[in-house]
Image (tube, helix red, strand yellow):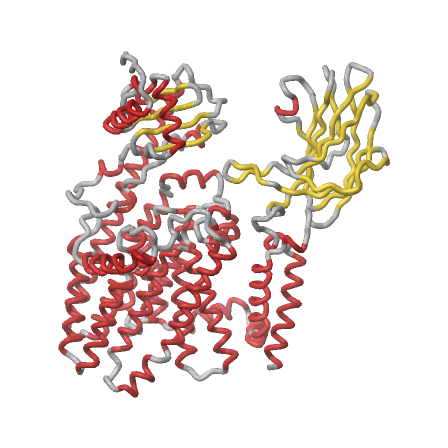
Amino acid sequence: MKKIIKALLGGLVLSLVLFALFLSPFLEDDAKWTYQSKFGRVDIVLVGDVSGGQITVQEKELFVSRPQWIRDGRANQGVVVQFPISYLKKSRQITLVPQGKGKKISFEMRFRGEYWRVYDQVKPAWAHFENIRLNGKPIVLEKTVWHNKPFIYRVQNVEIGQKMTLSFDIHKPFFFTDIRWDRLLGLFIACSLLISCSDILRRLVNGFNKKDIVQVIAKGYSSIDIVYRRAFWIVFGVLCLAFGFHTIQFMWGNHDWEFLRFSPHWLYFRGIGRYALAFFRKSFLGGIYLPLVYDIISFIFLAINAILLCIYWKLSKRVIYFVLCGLILTVQPFTLSIMFYVHMLPEVFIGVTFILTALMISEKIAFEKSSPMRRGIFSVLSMVLINLSLAMYPVLINTIAVAFVGRLLIKSFEWDGSWKQFKSYFLPFSFSALNIVLGILSYKLVLTFVFPPSYGYNTRMLSLDQIWERLLTLFKQSFHQLYEYNLPFISQAALWVFLSFTILVALYICLTGNFKQKIVRLILLGGTLYATQTAMMVAHIHIIDERIELFGLVPYETLMAVIVFTNLKKLYNCTIITTAGVIWVSIINDLDCLHVWKLGFDAEKMLWNRVLARLEVQKDFDVTRKYKVVQIGPEIPMRPRYIKQIPKVRTHDMLQFSWNLFPFVAENFYYPADFIRTRLRFERLDDPKYKAQLKHLWEAGTLDKARAWPHENGLIVWKDIILFVTNAKLLEEYKKQLAKEFPRQPQKTP
């Protein structure tokens, strides 16, 4: 009890110290004070007859500028003075000297925060001014302002050359009502856990003091089993070979191009239920995308996950087993489906590491005799890791389910069929199951009460009346995925190998053991296969996607290889040759897919450069204006043109071949300013915004002359709208529907 009180008091003190030193992370919320300004501003704007007038600032340490808006087409209309601020109050003094041709001049002083935009919306970045004085005369005691709500003070008829001293105190505003108590509570829990483990940390520090740090690291590395070390480096090396072209080329997809210019704001990830990914995005490498670093770190965690999963599933400790099973998990083309989204790497693979760590910790604590405090600490740690993994990528719930049920299946092969051994073998796993459930529930509670998602496409739940129908659909899908995909770069023969492994395991179960063992093992085998569809059991929309299969089907295939290697040792040579063949075919398909990606990537850039070149010669186009892009039809697919053999029946859009670069995304890179206000692409006419823009084009007769690209009228500029047509059939359908709703006399096509 004394240790618990000591840990809680120490955690309280440490958390308060950290809170005082690092306020910002604990003050960001959706309330009024969400954005504290990093800079204070005083905009000095001349009013009245200011011909030839100007204001000079004598302090050199301040950032002084004269932007276009403050000049308003005439020279020297004012000045913007900007300076950094913090939560600590700081006094500022600005010496102003009016100059001009006349005798007197008038101006306004606008006290405000910085101009802060998040996704084309100006956010209130607050700054707090106190004791504002002009030449020692008090103006106002205190004002809290932001860019769009400044405090304005007008100074009338100041003589030219007369020096004026503006002084004030400024800091970021802070109120107790603005504190993120959930984050502060999390900090307190983390600090308390840290204090409770202080003895372990003290031993580590003493070890570092007595020995050279290189020796400590070398000793720690050498303490890892040599099988794990060798397997890790082999898997890591093969990953660098299989996906090396991606590392060198650094290819991006669709809207992610925008993240090259502006790292996605943490609110974007929080809005789709990935608040942990938001944290990593903000802190990891400063949100900067470094091609080589990102891929190498991703490969490291991929290789670690492969070794951890084999350890968790108790694979026989041989290098060749670990390497083959690890490569089955990592080098199949399914991995490329997540590598297409570079902005999610390597955080998603770190999430898998969290899952495996949580499961291994839970199992270790469950099967050993430990104190309630130790059990509680590691239980909380497991729940937190599972919570964070789902907050990285909710689809990782598939990995949790397959890994855990697969572990039960492997454990069942050690069970002798008796009830006594059943209790000692399986009941401790209820501790892991409880941690998993609590971790998932904590994630749901965070989404409900702390970080409610603003975009529900991947967090919206299925209604209760549809669950049974969905479960039956997924039951069929779980078996169907073992024998048919009809996709490029996925070898049908490779799928059949794992189907064969599943059949072999099922036959082995039926031919060995007593009736109880057979029933339990068959149930767990079917449950593991069904667990690959866990995410879709509750999701509002049933999606079949390679990114989902990567975290469900691929671990299942790895599990089948693990069981065959461990229990069907008479098939050793045949299994080695078969799995090696699957890995070889997978690597070839990876390289082929990356080759097609590169050809399509270059073709798409060339296509959109042609579109922009056509746009530039339009007589009504002005790069300084803001336009609405209205697109009729999908993006023009380029990558499928380079696939050697496209299946006749496609059940999926394999490896994002339907996701091209978004139209006009290149203007963000090739133009000095963004001329796009909004993009309305391939919407349906039941979308009111899209329909309103098409109505304007229809009534003006612009749609009558429109044609599909590459016709010269495939791209038309009309007023503040850029019309881009990629599908002639869809254009005609829209024209017919608009003609019914908004009848008019159609204009003749020139």
Name the residue at 15% across, 75% down: 510
In the image, 210: left or right of 83?
left
x then y, percent, for residue 50: 73, 17
Name the residue at 31% across, 40% down: 659
In the image, 361: left or right of 118?
left
Q: Nearer the viewer, residue 257 or 539?
A: 539
Q: In which quarter of the image is residue 161?
A: top right
x then y, percent, for residue 130: 77, 43
x then y, percent, for residue 472: 23, 60
Position of 296 relative to 215 (above/below): above
Q: Is residue 142 visible?
A: yes
x then y, percent, for residue 505: 18, 70
Count every numbered label the image shows and give the total. 0
Quarter of the rendering occupied by the C terminus? top left
Q: Nearer the viewer, residue 190 or 488?
A: 190
Q: Which of 548 and 457 is in front in this view?
A: 457
Residue at the right extreme, as displayed:
136
Q: Is residue 551 visible?
A: no
In the image, 311: left or right of 507?
right
In the image, 404: left or right of 668?
left
Q: Quadrant of residue 208?
A: bottom right
Quarter of the rendering occupied by the N terminus? bottom right
Name the residue at 22% across, 75% down: 521
Name the residue at 36% across, 71% down: 226
Position of 464 relative to 419 (above/below): above
